[in-house]
Structure formats: structure tokens, C-alpha cells
Image: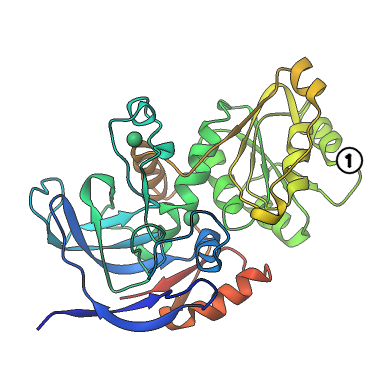
Amino acid sequence: MNKTMKAAVLRRIGAGLAIETVPRPDPGPGEVLVRVKACGVCHSDLHAVEGDWTPHPTLPLIPGHEVTGHVEALGEGVADFNKGERIGVPWMFWSCGICEFCLQGMETICPRTEATGYSKPGGYAEFMVAPAAFCGHLPEHVDMHAMAPILCAGVTTYRGIKRTGARPGQWLAVIGIGGLGHIAVQYAKAMGLRVAAVDVLTEKLNHAKRLGAEVLIDAREGDPGAALREKSGGGAHGAIVTAVSPRAFEQSVTMLRPAGTVSYIGLPGRDADQIRLSISSIVNSEITVRGSNVGTRQDLNEAIAFAANGLVKADIKTQPLENINAIFARMKKGEITGRVVLDIS
Ligand SMILES: [Zn+2]
Ligand SMILES: [Zn+2]
């Protein structure tokens, strides 16, 4: 008899997830079978089940790309994992390794890339398979639930900060202190940066302060760019936008000092995908506006190391898999603070 597993499955866009008993997958060559312990709920999962992005996810879909678990079985030829070892599976399920982007260490934008919980089944299930070469090794001592958000929120904010080029002692503006932003503040502090936190909710700014932000800017008041430039002695050297309001992306550019760089990592969605920027201020001040998309395997290893060493800790709330549709409903209303992590074990 074939083995089965419990999973949250999307059969049709807009239909919501159903908890089903489905066949347990077998690992192919180079793959591992992961016994899932925890899986974070990312805003991208909501975009996937609602069909907000083109191309749509592969159906039927099991979402989830912030996966931690243990190696249950090894496919043929897997040499770098052992049975029982702790493992993390990120959004980047696989990339080709031979295109011009992979060859330049930009595997995150490989045109042939496969995405966990989008084009391939993810971690809202008791088991999943993943290519061993794209998974992270997790140390024995880590809290598997707290570690789950590092697999997407962690690596994404970490790479975004790296791509600003800001150096220790310099200022970083973190715009949006939510599920991604509260992690970004901690990476920035651990990397020796001085943090200016920007949000529209006092409660979130206070959270950033407790995490070490030196300057707090309420973007509802006056000119937030001018306020940040004044309080940081000329503006931020780098900025990272995790918010989903287009206005936040526009304002971020005004928060930079000359020669500064902003990394865009938030995704507002199809209906709010356009912004207006001042060409002259970008040209005259040699500003850089760049995108940053999840992270490479090297970024993942570094992001995990910060968290495993206690320098970064996601603020999580654990929920059972069965609650997933209610979690999405709350996420849609913006009612979730920190990160929800599904307890699958
Ligand atoms: Zn994600
Ligand atoms: Zn490639």
C-alpha cells in the first residue's frame, strides 16, 4: 500500500485550501524527502492561492516555502545530507546552474528557476521533496519553529540589506516594520548598521525601537524623507522597502543621502504596481534603486548562521495547519503582526 500524508491543497484559484490526505512523494535522484516540522506563512503564499501573479501556480498546489524539518529519506546520489539531519527548504527550489545569471551568482533570477510552494509542492504538508543542493543545513540546537521564517523573510531581508552596499557604522532605513521589517532591523543591527525605522503604526515603531532602531519615523507625519535626513545627519546610506504601499517605495528614495542605494523587496501586488520617482534627484545625487529577490544559496547559508547564532529571531505565533484559511483571512486584513508559523509535526 502506498504511504499517504496530510496536506493543505489548492485545487482551483480562489477556492481556498482544503486539508486532504494525499500520496506521500518519493525523493528522486539528488532529492531528499523532508519530514516537515514547521512552515512559515508568507504573504507570497496568499498571492499564490489568490492567483495574483502570472504565471499562476502549478495546480493542484501545496503552498509553503519557509520549511524546516528532518531528512526522512535520501534519493539516489545525495551525499551532503544524512538521514535524520535538520534541513530548511527555501523559496528557490531549484535553478539551472548554466544560464548567464546562474553563472554570475544571480541564481535568484534564473529564467528556469522552480519555486517551492508555487511551481513545486511546498511545506503545508507532513512531507515534501526538495533538491538537496538547494536546501539549507540547520544546526542541532535551533528552534525549528523560530527558524522557519528565516528561510524566506530572513534570507530576503538579508540579501536586500547586502544589496544596498551599506557598511558597518552607516545608516540603513528599514521602511515597513512587519513580518519582513522586524527581521531586517535585527540583521542590520547584527551587521553593524545604524537603523532608522519607518512605519505608519506607533506600535510597530516601538517594536523596532526595542530591536535597536535609533531613529523612528512616522511616515504619516509631515515629510518623512526630510525628517529622516535630519535625524541621520544627511540621510540613509542604504534603505530597504518591505512595505506594500507604493507611496513607501517613492518616499524611500527621498530618505537616502547622495550616492545611497535602496533595495525594493516588498511586492504590493498587481493593482498597486506603479510608482513615480524624481529623475533629477536620482541623476544629480547618483542614487541607485534596485530590486532584490529572495536570496542565493550563499545568502541562505549566511542568513541561517546569523539566526543560529542568536543574532536574529523572528517574532512568531504557532498555529495548526487546519487554521490556514483563517490565517489568510487575517493576513488580507493586515491583522497579523510578526510571522505565523504552522506546526506540522
Ligand atoms: Zn516568502
Ligand atoms: Zn539559471
The residue furthest right is 222
Left or right relative to 166: residue 176: right
Q: Which amino acid does label 1 sit on?
A: Asp
Residue 72 placement (x, y as % from top left): 16, 65
Residue 268 placement (x, y as % from top left): 66, 53
Is the residue at mark 1 in contact range of ligand 1, meaning its CB lies under 8 Å from it?
no
Instruction: Please state which of residues 194 and 39 is positioned toward the viewer in this rendering.
Output: 39
Q: Residue at x 27, y 52 (%)?
A: 139
Residue 196 placement (x, y as % from top left): 70, 40
Residue tagged by mark 1?
223
Left or right relative to 214: residue 41: left
Where's the N terminus, which quadrant?
bottom left
* Residue 301 seen in this snapshot: yes
**Residue 299, image quadrant:** top left
Where's the C terminus, which quadrant?
bottom left
Give the vertical position of 305 relative to 282 (above or below).
below
Instruction: Please state which of residues 70 and 273 is positioned toward the viewer in this rendering.
Output: 273
Left or right relative to 179: residue 232: right
Residue 238 placement (x, y as % from top left): 64, 31
Q: Which colour scheme is used?
A: rainbow
* Residue 312 seen in this snapshot: no
